[in-house]
Image: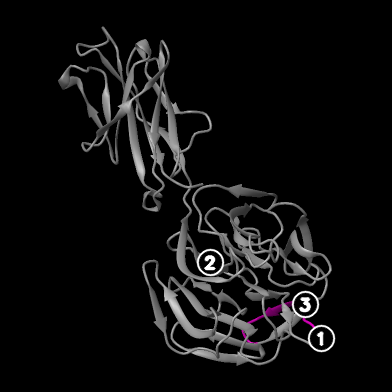
Amino acid sequence: MAYDSQRDRTVLFGGWSGSIHADAWEWNGASWTQVSGGPSGRYGHSMAFDSLHGCVVLFGGQGSGTQFGDTWTFDGTTWTQVATSGPTAGESHCMVFDIQRGRIVLFGGNATRSPGPIYLGETWEWDGSTWTLVSTAGPAPRTAAAMAYDSVRGRSVLFGGYSPATGVLGDTWEWDGAAWAQVAASGPPVRHYHAMAFDGPRGKTMLFGGRASGGPSSGENDTWEWDGAAWGQLGGPAPPVRWIHAMVFDSARRRMVTFGGVWSPSGVGIFLDDTWERGTALATTGIYGASCGSPPVTFGPHVGSRPMIGQAQLSDVGNAPFGFAAVVWGVTQQALSLDFLGITGCTLLNGAEMEIGSFCASTSFSSAQHNLAIPYDLTLLGVRVYLQAWVLAPGYNPFGIALSNGLELVIGDV
């Protein structure tokens, strides 16, 4: 699977679910549509989008009784075979597009030979017309690794896979266009048949799922991210356990898109045809407007709290007499003087559609805390919410009320 950033389409070809497929499909963020044409049926092939030449590039794979070493391109309309020589014919290699150098980078895989498979450790590059062997050094020969291109740092990032010498791997390597360097020996648990993609706006390489060993219960459904220095595990809901799935980053919609895979809870493979997405939006907070009161009411995010989907946003109210406060919120902001209501010296900073969010919990005789529960709903990503605290202020104005500054929340998942 590959994401065509020029047409905003995720392109999927082939696969295996008890039989070999030779169909091509496109995902537009709402539905899958089958497209005509394509190479002969195969699985274990690799795909990447070449933005320099405006086409999806497909290499290799396993067919019915044969392994392929051919290269195809898809421009959104037509599939074209562009090469029959290059890397060793095989399957389960990993491939990305290095946008800074305008090269497809391919590593590893396995080739069927008698009496057993040959595991590959070669690095090849495709310039749009020719394959070139650029390195035989670097990561140990392996199959079923995963790779993503970090366009911020100009590195192809590889993790894990299976090597006959050491078994299932958990090492991290980077290719800079000239040489491989091992950059981490720890991180996610060892695995192969996982998937990786790069989230450009956040500058993180994402990893999901995979299989730790050959046992029926060895599958994973954890999500990790690599920032160029360290791996960190992400929480939140995730697709069920799977391996041999595909994953890309849809840059137009800022979504990780995952399709298919297999799992075998009882030792019998179950083939999956579900599509999952994970949004990527940065959760932020900001202060705006002026408060009133004597002393002025303060309102801001609790230390370490950010407005993440599936979590609670905690915000602190200060200079709240008797520890009493209520928070109103809306999805627009304004600056409306409340002098006409007798709440003199104060400004309403929420839009007219404001609603009472909730009363706050008292934390002391002069402070309170607001708890805003944010449901796990991807449609909320990027939504802005504007909050303002109201407190009792006897004697401050005829109405005896004071208002805080405004607090802007941008809902995200990171």
Question: Residue 252 at what x, y percent from top left?
Answer: 44, 63
- Amino acid type indicated by mark 1: Pro
Seen from this angle, which residue lies furthest top?
395
Q: Position of residue 142 (x, y in %)?
A: 76, 71
Region rendered in magenta: 115-129
Q: CA distance from mark 1 to mark 2?
A: 35 Å
Residue lying farthest to the left in this orientation: 340
Query: Tag 2 or tag 1, which sits nearer the N-term?
Result: 1
Q: Which of the two discs, 3 and 2, sits closer to the camera?
A: 3
Q: CA distance from mark 1 to mark 3?
A: 16 Å
Task: Give the residue pinned by disc 3.
Answer: 120
Tell which of 269 and 110 is nearer to you. 269
Return the residue at label 2: 248
From the top left corner, tell me how far across and down residue 204 is, in percent: 59, 55
* 116 falls in the magenta region: yes
Write down the residue under mark 1: 115
Q: Amino acid at mark 2?
A: Val
Q: Residue at x 37, y 18 (%)?
A: 297
Q: Earlier in the sequence, mark 1 or mark 3?
A: 1
Judging from the image, what secondary structure is the residue with disc 3 in? loop
- Left or right: residue 137 compared with residue 239: right
Residue name at image x 18 percent, y 16 percent? 342
Q: Position of residue 197 (x, y in %)?
A: 58, 63
Q: Determine whether 325 is above or below 189 in the image.
A: above
Whether residues under marks 1 and 3 lie with C-beta atoms below 8 angstroms apart, the answer is no
Task: Tell whether label 2 touches label 3 (CB within 8 Å).
Answer: no
